[in-house]
Amino acid sequence: MLDTRGNLSYIPAKILASAIPQGLGSTYKRLPPHAHPMTPPFLHRLRLATCLALFGAMLATTRADDTPGLLPGGPRFGLDMRAMLAKGGCNAGTCHGNASGKGGFKLSLRGEDPAFDFLAIAREGAGRRIDLLDPAKSLVLEKATLRMPHLGGRRFANDSALGKLLRDWLAAGAPAPSADEPRLVSLEVSPLEILVREPTHEVQIRVLAIFNNGARLDATSLAVYEPVEVKTEVTPGGLVSTKDHGETTVLVRFLDRQQAVRLAFLPASPPPAWTDFEPANYIDRLVDARLQQLGIRPSGPAADGVFLRRMFLDGLGILPSAEEAREFAADRSPAKREAWIDRVLARPEFADHWALRWSDILRNEEKVLDVEGVTKFHGWLRAGFAAGMPLDELVHKLVAARGSTYTEPPANYYRALRDPFVRAETTARLFLGARIACAKCHNHPFDRWTQDDYYSFAAMFSRVDYQIVKNERRDKLDLNEFAGEQIVKLNDKGSVTNDRTKKPATPRLLDPAAKPLAEKDDPLVATANWLTAPENKQFARVQANFIWYHLLGRGLVEPIDDFRPTNPAVYPELLDALADDLRDHGHDLRHLVRRILRSRVYQTSAEPNEFNRDDDRHFAKAIVRRLTAEQLLDAQSQVLDRPAEFASYPLGTRAGQIAGAERGGKKGKENAEGDRFLKLFGKPARLLGCECERSNETTLAQTFALLSSPALEERLIANDTRVARWAASDMSGEAILRELYWTALGRDPTAAEIAALGPGLSAGPKRLTSLHDVVWGIMNSREFLLRH
């Protein structure tokens, strides 16, 4: 069996087979050829020490129960080594847990696959990383303790607890993971939430791991602590400190469990309790209770004009007219805001606005859906919102859809999602707030989704197929462009291959309690039924968060499509209450919008006070944000009373009424001025199916477009605008200025503004030019460009 140089030249098949740890066969197949124990290079390089290591691994399970380790009967690879590798950062995505590994050494991300990690450490490279005859000389130990050069630096000291875990495992014969190892069933972390006031600046987190055999382990020193905010520091032992006031979140991870800890570091003296804000509904009560705890005093109510303009923009996407703004200001009824909310929600622009919002996330764009499909899809959405279609019914129709994309508009949902993986990822993100894409390559590092979950859910959409009736695309080389009717259909068979097992995935919902899909079941209907079932509260949470985001400018969960235990809502109780409210009222969009608009939280001023000046998470003051591309262009058109032009849309179409993303361009009719403006100011191309695709960031090109755009100037100086009519009228300069302010800003000009601008608008040869300058200045002002 040994040659004259001590190399192993032959291993009897029975011995080799017994030396391979049980259950690792599939993992062996995934190792590169040079690491496979049956390849010739392995047989020629394996030394006597490594041969003995194979026998040591077989004998390790018979060692006495007093073997060192985290629990009696150890050490164990799946417990001790997995904990050591995670705490040392060895299997992190920035180290050997990277998809390509580091330095030729690859581990599974965050230890998700102990069997693979064992082979990489103990078998790969002819077992060169361990030395069981002299464990202290093992490469894996010498590099981790920096006794040998290591690009990753020293991960732990040789005499540390982590070093002892590794040495004990090596001394025990480097046992492989086994199916009978204790399994972690729960992680008890304390505190889960705490308020800390000065002079205290630190909080100690404690972690208790509970296993299926009843064993309990203090894992405080072994858990991994990851602060979400940069300002927070956590020691390896779980001591949290911060140099600033405010809330923070720390993710606590041990083995395959993780928990989020919410902490709030507060000044020594909270502000006095306030009683001058009367809550309008449960939203205010829940927010006030938390703000009182945090010592954050909310700002006062927004002024009438600010509130009306805000409500029109958020609910309808347009500005109130001068007549409406004046009427609201003159109304002295104490309940006028509630009455005007009802009035606004009954307007047809409400359906336009929400059809636009949903078209963004449903990838309603012309390249894949074609112009006809985009128009039909948008029209169906708009009609649904106009008629008050419940959100659960709308989503059920989308997910269960099939048929012609022209005669069955919801089928366009699948026309835009061309493979089962994109269908699964998009459906999970939009309607469950679950970002499962990470689980395609490995178990999700921050959520509970596994690779098996990912591929099983993708298999639910594997039978979707398309009958392309015709395709008259303009670019014959662009295979992603479609122009013509398509039939979305469900084939009798279809599958996806699980990348981990290399076998067809079993169709299953993203629900641990769900049974595999029966052969006779319709997978799309089953998915739609499960998503919108009353007991699936997560669906209602996601929809409530989406609505809140569009009205308040920030989600209770942020990003809005990233719900997970390690990304808790800023107000968990409020999110649950909103979800219950939505569900209890038949998933009625208008009902929840009305509830939010009536709250004092929504109606709060954007003016900060000394207690909320640095806070942007708790909705203690309104979030100031730039108008969206559509809102800004429509606001300009509204002030000038001159519509912008869009390619392939009739003149007079508002930007907020456009069905798709872009109809012009190099392949067809050139884009019109309005199309170019929307693209420049962040209208999404709708290629991702994600709210994140829309950009409200300010750019230098936008500044030039506002300050010196020939298109804007052309509209401003045209002879048929409201501005030209004002200049040609017999109105006084002050009257014109007042009309302009009510039209553009929803308020009367101040005395100072009248004194500064009114005289220049008096009748005379320069009146029109002066008025152009004033209008241009107002449309470039912060008050006009921003939603306060």
Image (cartoon, rainbow, N blue to C red):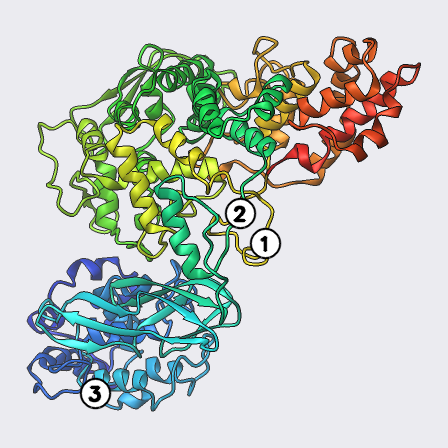
Q: What is the quadrant of the N terminus in the image?
A: bottom left
Residue underneath mark 1: 609
Q: Are marks 3 and 2 in contact (CB under 8 Å)?
A: no
Q: Quadrant of residue 226?
A: bottom left
> Measured from the top left, where is residue 499 in percent x and y?
26, 48
Helix, strand or loop status at disc 3: helix
Q: Nearer the viewer, residue 109 or 706?
A: 706
Residue underneath mark 3: 171
Q: CA distance from mark 2 to mark 1?
A: 9 Å
First in residue order: circle 1 vs circle 3: 3
Classify residue 748 as left or right of residue 652.
Answer: right
Classify residue 460 as left or right of residue 418.
Answer: left
Q: Looking at the picture, which amino acid does disc 2 mark?
A: Lys
Q: Is residue 44 visible?
A: no
Q: Looking at the picture, which amino acid does disc 3 mark?
A: Ala
Q: CA distance from mark 3 to mark 2?
A: 61 Å
Q: Looking at the picture, which amino acid does disc 1 mark?
A: Asn
Q: Nearer the viewer, residue 741 or 569?
A: 741
First in residue order: circle 2 vs circle 1: 1
Residue underneath mark 2: 621
Q: Nearer the viewer, residue 90 or 231?
A: 231
Q: Are marks 2 and 1 in contact (CB under 8 Å)?
A: yes
Q: Is residue 23 visible?
A: yes
x 29%, y 77%: residue? 220
x 39%, y 85%: residue? 145
> Measured from the top left, where is residue 311 in percent x and y?
51, 30
Helix, strand or loop status at disc 2: loop
Mark 3 is surrounded, within 10 Å at the Cα level, by few (under 14), some (14 to 19) or many (20 or more) other residues, namely many
x 73%, y 13%: residue? 722
Mark 2 is surrounded, within 10 Å at the Cα level, by few (under 14), some (14 to 19) or many (20 or more) other residues, namely many
Q: What is the quadrant of the C terminus in the image?
A: top right
